Amino acid sequence: MDCLFCQIVAGKTPADKVYEDGEFLAFWDIHPQAPVHILIVPKSHISSLTELTGEQQDLLGRFILLAKELAEKEGISADGYRLTINCGAEGGQLVPHLHLHLLGGRRLDDQLG
């Protein structure tokens, strides 16, 4: 199990968790790019968006709804926030485990690349 996020899910690597259920784990990013920077990961290992199939569309919908709920919980929903999924090395994905960045708490730059 070389995947960092799988190790966090398994409790072998510590993380500052903000949410956990049977399918997902959310925790604070250790190198935050905004005052609120939470990573949301599925507990099952999926390397990236490129591995998703139609059978996982419900999982992806719950992924986004969880991000919305966490934005509300963190008090950034009304002012706005950003959700980002990087895909592959050239897309900026550093950990090969599907994850969603929830960023907010300040005005975010409009540059995306």
Image (cartoon, helix red, strand yellow):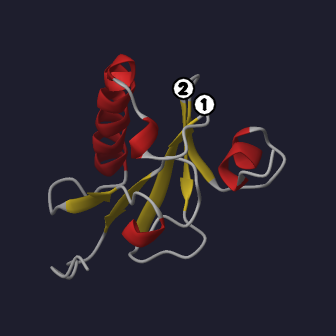
Q: Nearer the viewer, mark 2 or mark 1?
A: 1
In what element is the residue under mark 1? loop
The residue depicted at 60 percent of the width and 31 percent of the height is: 44
The answer to whether the residue labelled 2 contacts the one labelled 1, judged by CB atoms less than 8 Å apart, is yes
The residue depicted at 20 percent of the width and 78 percent of the height is: 107
Image coordinates of residue 2 in percent, x first then y, are 79, 52
Measure the alpha-carbon separation of dots 2 and 1: 7 Å
- Seen as rendered, the residue at the extreme top is 55
The residue depicted at 70 percent of the width and 40 percent of the height is: 9
- Seen as rendered, the residue at the extreme right is 12
In what element is the residue under mark 2? loop
Depth check: give the residue in front, 98 or 89. Answer: 89
The amino acid marked with disc number 1 is Ser
Q: Which residue is mark 1?
A: 44
- Return the mark for residue 23: 2
> Crowdedness of circle 2 by 10 Å Cα count: few (<14), some, many (20+)?
few
